[in-house]
Amino acid sequence: AIGCGGQGAVDLNDAAKTENITALCDVDEARAAASFNRFNKTPKYKDYRVMLEKEGKNIDACIIAIPDFMHATVALACMQQGKHVYVE
């Protein structure tokens, strides 16, 4: 999950019902605190590029729930590594 606060938290919680959550990423740790606490054993990152580099082999798909101006940049980086993406 890239973007774990606000709508990202809603998307993350819905995905967690059926999927394994392997990594979390959010630049705002305060806004993402509830998600970070809920998935306290899941690796956490502030930079999606570092997350993809370190956890890429464990990731099949990414939920991207971040501000609109970064949608394309982050989605493209994920797709270039062969990840499925959900962008909101």
Image (spheres, grey):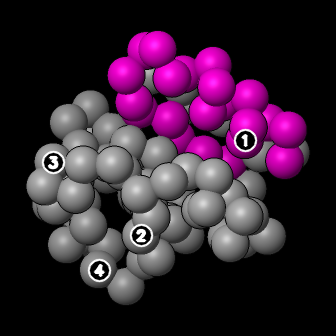
Label whose residue precedes the other's in the sequence (3 or 1): 3
Query: Marks 1 and 4, how far apart in space?
Result: 23 Å
Residue to which mark 1 is pinned: 78
- Residue ID at (77%, 45%): 83
- Residue ID at (79%, 36%): 79
Q: Is residue 62 above or below residue 36?
A: above
| Picture disc at residue 40 | 4
- Residue ID at (43%, 15%): 68
Q: Which residues are magenta?
A: 61-81
Q: Amino acid at mark 3?
A: Arg
Query: Marks 3 and 1, how far apart in space?
Result: 23 Å
Q: Residue furthest bottom?
A: 41
Q: Secondary structure at mark 4?
A: loop
Examine the structure image and report whether residue 64 is included in the region drawn in magenta: yes
In which quadrant of the rendered view does residue 65 lie? top left
Residue to which mark 3 is pinned: 31
Q: In the image, is 70 to the left or to the right of 36?
A: right
